[in-house]
């Protein structure tokens, strides 16, 4: 294979990284396995014979340069992204290749926009943060729902998860975020992120059937609060999470995801219901699928494929909805999730 098909995966041995490596191979790319732990990389390589293994550390720029040498792009799957995103983006810019990550951390994604927007645009580079279930999918759905609207009053992103068995990486990222916020919660209101000390409200959300009306934690803010406002004129972006999933996430006793099929997916199902409002009008986009970690892989790899084949609309640090034709992108993932649009 030529170098145009070579993609470095940093954090390849992590839970999501393994899905990304498998998806890249399925799509005809040649993954380079990279990350901070040589032992875990070696173990992963045993199940993917013939793949190049390149250990690297975010504290060692030269090792990152070696990891990205000859690659057409890099996908960063290694959290916490508050630590890894900056150094890997720097390495991607030095190499002159696109950068994609799967960060769900709100502040880490905000940092990426704040630190690299001007430089990436000036260099004509593509830096795509949060190309994952949280951040990328919600942004694509909101963009698709907007249609020909140029602005809206509100965007609501409601997550109907059957359960949420967090990975070790999710727990670590959550710990970093809580420490960074001083234990406060965050919401996007009045056109900016707000940090609050009060408890979030418990509400009801009318999900599409057959899920129906469920109790949700209101103002359950995820990376959509960064990706959506980065390019859509919407001053209020609210998130909601089914109470069962929120309880799973907060419990120290909840186990990690357990595979129920040959691909490694868990039994978890999801429904993401995005509603945008402008004046008295409403528009909606809905996605359904299985396993929030597994579905991140086709999201990230489809994005990468479109970047490498020039099917993009912008350069710089950009969210998925700005970079791609959102309805077309979502329909291209029909083997991984269903997509419905109501205008």
Image: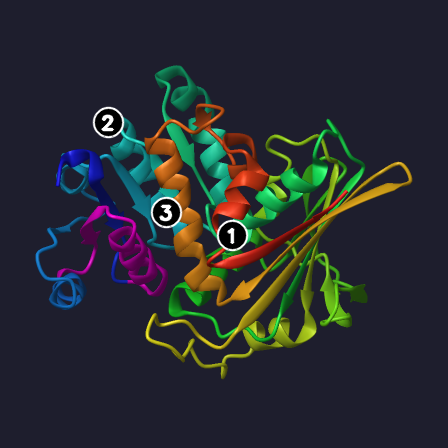
For this view, does 169 lie left or right of residue 28?
right
Q: Which residue is mark 2?
A: 94
Which residue is pictured at 68% across the width and 37% down the height? 192
SS state under label 1: helix
Q: Residue furthest top?
A: 122
Say if the magenta span includes residue 28: yes
Q: Residue furthest right?
A: 280
Q: Marks 2 and 3: which is nearer the front?
A: 3
Tag 1: Cα neighbours inside 10 Å, few (<14), some, or many (≥20)?
A: few
Residue 37 visible in the shown view: yes
Q: Quadrant of residue 74?
A: top left
Q: Earlier in the sequence, mark 2 or mark 3?
A: 2
Tag 2: Cα neighbours inside 10 Å, few (<14), some, or many (≥20)?
A: few
The front one of 57 and 41 is 41
Q: Earlier in the sequence, mark 2 or mark 1?
A: 2
Q: Which residue is mark 3?
A: 301
- Eyeballing the image, is 105 above or below 150? below
For this view, does 303 lie left or right of residue 248?
left
Q: Quadrant of residue 71?
A: top left
- Eyeballing the image, is 270 above or below 92? below
For this view, does 18 lie left or right of residue 293?
left
Residue 115: x percent and y percent?
44, 30
- Eyeballing the image, is 275 above or below 265? above
**Gap in angstroms between the C-alphas marked 2 and 3:** 22 Å
Which residue is pictured at 29% across the width and 28% down the height? 93
Residue 195: x percent and y percent?
67, 49
**Gap in angstroms between the C-alphas marked 1 and 3:** 30 Å
Tag 3: Cα neighbours inside 10 Å, few (<14), some, or many (≥20)?
A: many
Residue 82 visible in the shown view: no
Q: Which residue is mark 1?
A: 180
Magenta residues, start to end: 14-38
**Gap in angstroms between the C-alphas marked 2 and 1:** 29 Å
């Amino acid at each position: 294979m030529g170098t145009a098909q070579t993609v470095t995966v940093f954090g390849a041995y992590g839970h999501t990284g393994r899905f990304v490596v498998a998806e890249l191979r399925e799509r005809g790319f040649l993954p380079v396995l990279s990350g901070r732990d040589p032992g875990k990389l070696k173990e992963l390589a045993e199940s993917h014979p013939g793949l190049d293994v390149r250990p690297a550390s975010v504290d060692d720029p030269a090792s990152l340069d070696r990891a990205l040498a000859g690659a057409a792009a890099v996908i960063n799957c290694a959290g916490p992204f508050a630590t890894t995103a900056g150094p890997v983006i720097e390495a991607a810019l030095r190499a002159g290749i696109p950068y994609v990550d799967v960060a769900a951390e709100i502040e880490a994604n905000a940092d990426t926009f704040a630190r690299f927007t001007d430089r990436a645009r000036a260099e004509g580079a593509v830096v795509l943060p949060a190309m994952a279930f949280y951040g990328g999918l919600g942004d694509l759905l909101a963009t698709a729902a907007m249609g020909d609207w140029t602005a809206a009053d509100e965007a609501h992103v409601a997550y109907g998860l059957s359960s949420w068995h967090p990975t070790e990486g999710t727990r670590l990222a959550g710990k970093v975020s809580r420490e960074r916020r001083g234990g406060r919660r965050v919401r996007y209101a009045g056109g900016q992120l707000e940090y609050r000390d009060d408890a979030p409200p418990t509400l009801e959300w009318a999900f599409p059937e057959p899920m129906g009306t469920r109790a949700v934690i209101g103002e359950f803010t995820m990376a959509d609060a960064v990706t959506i406002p980065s390019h859509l004129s919407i001053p209020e972006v609210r998130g909601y999470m089914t109470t069962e999933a929120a309880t799973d996430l907060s419990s120290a006793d909840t186990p990690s995801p357990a595979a129920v099929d040959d691909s490694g997916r868990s039994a978890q199902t999801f429904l993401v219901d995005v509603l945008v409002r402008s004046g008295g009008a409403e528009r909606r986009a809905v996605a359904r699928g299985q396993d929030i970690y597994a579905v991140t892989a086709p999201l990230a790899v489809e994005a990468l494929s479109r970047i490498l084949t020039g099917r993009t609309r912008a350069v710089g640090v950009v969210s998925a909805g700005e970079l791609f034709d959102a309805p077309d992108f979502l329909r291209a993932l029909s083997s991984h999730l269903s997509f419905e649009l109501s205008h």
